[in-house]
Amino acid sequence: MNMNATKRMKTLGFFGLVVAVSVATNLTTNLVTQKGDSLPVQENKLPVTYAKFAHAANAMETDFTVAAELSIHAVVHVKTKSPIRMQRFGGYPDDSFFDYFFGQPQQSPRSRRGATDEPPMREGVGSGVIISNDGYIVTNNHVVEGSTDIEVTLNDKRTFKAKVIGSDPNTDIALIKVDAKDLPIIAFGNSDELKVGEWVLAVGNPFNLTSTVTAGIVSAKARNIQIIDSKMAIESFIQTDAAVNPGNSGGALVNTRGELVGINAAIASQTGSYAGYAFAIPVSIVQKVVSDIRQYGVVQRALLGVKIGDIDSKLAKEKKLKTLEGAYVDEVTDQSAAKAAGIKVGDVINNVNGTAVKSSAELREQVARYRPGDKITVTVVRGDSEEKLKVELKNKQGNFNVVKSENSKDVLGATFKELDTKTKDRLGLDYGIEIKSLSKGKLADQGLKAGFIILKINNKTIRSAEDVQEAYEDVMNNGEKEKPLYIAGAYPNGRVVYLAIDLAD
């Protein structure tokens, strides 16, 4: 039984006692009067102790109907289609991309009996939240990642095709858009003001059950469950016990005022279904990511330049720390913003711009709100004293500039066109994109010619020019420019080519 329920039981019990005493007193009076007995009735004054319940009246008056009505119309059902990677060219199983380079026989594309023009597709479902009346919708990156077709259905059953505007694997946020106007929107709340024990609603489409609302409380904040597979992952989840299941991903977490405070993203379960623990991305992070995507086309990731960890009693004893709260600085990167500001190994960071941070997850969340070039004040505990340090945040390239979304066309020097049915049938291909023209760039430097067919980039199946751009941005946005761009492809005569494009130059 939760605390609110216990309080209500106690409060109702107290009220019941008062009512019982009152009824008993009135009943005695009535009986005496009816008998015509003129003897005075002595009032029984029972000793009563009045209990005080914090905000008990407010807790009993909680009504979820207003919050549900304000949010349910702005939460959409997202259906996606993505190709199933069943086979690669030549009819061999689609093993690791590096099988193309090591150990596996190189086979030319060849026709296969039963080959079709369209690859087999996998359908997925999720949720999204309308954040502007002209059609911008926020959802999870994992809901739309790799999708070739996205369909959005509103609560009023209208259906639209959607396109991906941008995404950030580091926070698992994606921004998509539909061509529509005057759509219902949801107001942004303040996830910083959420308190553990506060009521929240999860709104989404679990198991394809559209427009579903569940209620629970905030169980914890700043949870790091290590579910985002990224070197620069930002995890500071809101944990709730509102029932969330597959299909809720990308849906809304709202407070009792109907304000958006998070985007539901994950559950902790041994079965794949709800087991009491659900996690949402705080709206403070969501707003920053969406704003960057709309303004710059790519997320502006500000870096402090430290390796940090949480503090437990063992570490505190070993390092002779005076506190258990904050993020312990284990390493400071050369040429970083932290080093320039004077942050040292052994410091404990416990505050950013006046906001207390109790863990490494909270520190990452706070820094993630800023952009390269922003100046912040960081408080560190060093020995027996605290120091406030001015920090000018840098980008992943080590400078203060805003990062722009680079176009693969400018770097690779190519334009593309879709494969026609004749070429697919002749070579036995289910996917690929053909180089239409080449100018000065990385591909021409490799000796490639127009007509070359790109099949995969870094183990990602390529079907469109957009796929080429996304594969390129994955490398650039993850700070892996020094790594080659691995390309597998074929010439129109069937000759297979494998390339490693150096992007660092």
Image (cartoon, rainbow, N blue to C red):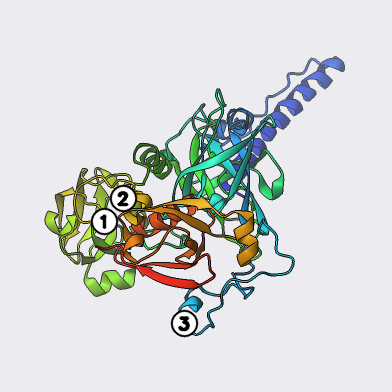
How far across and down, in percent of the image, does residue 379 sit?
20, 51
Label 2, residues with CA under 10 Å away: few <14, some 14-19, many ≥20: many
* Secondary element at tag 1: loop
* Residue closest to the far bottom: 103
Front residue of this view, candidates 152 and 188? 152
Classify 464 as above or below 497.
Answer: above
Check whether the beta carbons of the residues at disc 1 and disc 2 lie within 8 A of each other. yes
* Residue closest to the far right: 35
Which mark is drawn over residue 102? 3
Q: CA distance from mark 1 to mark 2?
A: 7 Å
Mark 1 / mark 2, whichever is N-terminal: 2
* Residue closest to the far front: 493
Residue 112 located left or right of residue 465: right
Determine the residue positioned at 59% across, 69% down.
88
Classify 504 as above or below 243.
Answer: below
Label 1, residues with CA under 10 Å away: few <14, some 14-19, many ≥20: many
Q: CA distance from mark 3 to mark 1?
A: 32 Å
**Residue 337 in view in this figure:** yes
Residue 180 located left or right of residue 474: right
How far across and down, in percent of the image, does residue 268 sit?
57, 60
Classify 210 as above or below 434.
Answer: above
Quarter of the figure with residue 295: top left
**In this figure, which residue is indicated by the disc labeled 1?**
396
Check whether the beta carbons of the residues at disc 3 and disc 1 lie within 8 A of each other. no
Check whether the beta carbons of the residues at disc 2 and disc 3 lie within 8 A of each other. no
Q: CA distance from mark 2 to mark 3?
A: 36 Å
**In this figure, which residue is indicated by the disc labeled 2?**
301
